[in-house]
Image: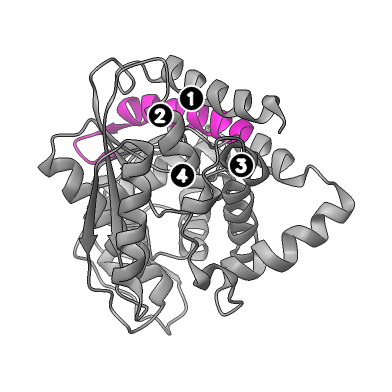
Amino acid sequence: MRSRDVEHVRRAIRAAAIRLPDVFAPGTRLVVAFSGGQDSTCLLHALAHAHRTLDLLAVHVDHGLRPDSAESAQRVSDAARTIGVRCEVVRVEVAKRGSVQQAARVARYAALAAAAQAHDAKAILVAHTADDQAETLLLNLLRGTGLLGLAGMRMDEVRAARLVRPLLDVSRSTTLAYCTHFGLLSTIVEDASNQTRVYTRNRVRLDLLPLLREFNPAVHEVLSRMADLVAEDLEVLDALASDLYTTLQNDGTYDLRAFRAQPRALQRRLLRLGLQHAGLSLKNVADRPLEDALNLLQTGQPNQTYHLPYGVEVCIGHQTFVLRQHGNARAPSARNTWESVGSRV
């Protein structure tokens, strides 16, 4: 077996420890999301045998979506004990309406966050690989995305709890080689749903990525590296926008001339920051209304306003503009238009 694959995994753990010393400090309690598949088995084993003493707890989330899920959960728990790590099984209820896969993901991360809080863990470690990163980028491209989507998953991010992905630059072929080297294949518990083409992500994994590998055998490495580069650029842009935001606004009123002097990429981020401060969640807001609002801010005349979804208005003054809450919410079917308003800003 190729020793370089084992070293690649170990090097990834060391690199994560260098970048995140607080997470990997000796004695730190960590929750490891443990599905029992090859990737999470590789991660759990590598952490358990790393040259540092970590307080590990494997947590397996049983979604209860298959008749044999309880039996599989027991096998997963046994596999963790074989590696030498205690395992906690958490059963969750998954809503059957809408996307079952998305509902399962939400329930899973909520359960992991609850376990981390209950055990006072520093972070949750998940075994996403470079292949997972490639799938995520392709899915985002197919749906339509900006830089945030192209940045993919981050090694270290905070949701309901802190998530760390030490294997994000390691391929699935490498995690398989690692498990083979240490005789772990017999303990692996694979989820049969990963092979069904009902889910779009599985079709990307099973059909699209193999096709792309015909053009470039290292396509997952290329996409993973692109995500890293985009994420670094995104951090710079976000930092610039955050610094600018503090100078452009005063108590909810924004300097219109200074805003117009910025490149559109920064204007877009400034507008999004302003809307977030105005209480608008941007998760379900389409790009088009935001782009129309930017057009108004660039060329609009005093006393014009623009209605964004959820009752937020962009109101133009002579030298300033404001983002006003609880305005006239545009009906979803109505066309966005610029209107004149009686009050000056």
Q: Earlier in the sequence, mark 1 or mark 4?
A: 1
Q: Residues within 10 Å of mark 4 (few under 14, many from 20)?
A: many
Find residue 163 and report its horizontal and vertical position in percent. Answer: 35, 39
The amino acid pointed to by label 4 is: Thr
Q: Earlier in the sequence, mark 3 or mark 1?
A: 1
* Magenta stretch in the rendered image: 228-253
Determine whether label 2 and label 1 are within 8 Å by CB.
Answer: yes
Q: Which mark's residue is nearer the viewer, 1 or 4?
A: 4
Report how far apart the C-alphas of labels 2 and 1 lie in the structure: 8 Å
Residue at the spot 42% in from the left edge and 21% down from the top edge: 50
Residue 251 shown in magenta? yes
Residue 41: image tag: 4
Residue 221 shown in magenta? no
The residue most toward the right is: 215
- Tell me the residue that label 2 is attached to: 47
Q: Is residue 274 above or below residue 138?
A: above
Report how far apart the C-alphas of labels 4 and 3 lie in the structure: 11 Å
The amino acid pointed to by label 1 is: Ile
Q: Quadrant of the N terminus?
A: top right
Q: Residues within 10 Å of mark 3 (few under 14, many from 20)?
A: some
Q: 274 or 45, which lies in front?
A: 45
Q: Earlier in the sequence, mark 4 or mark 3?
A: 4
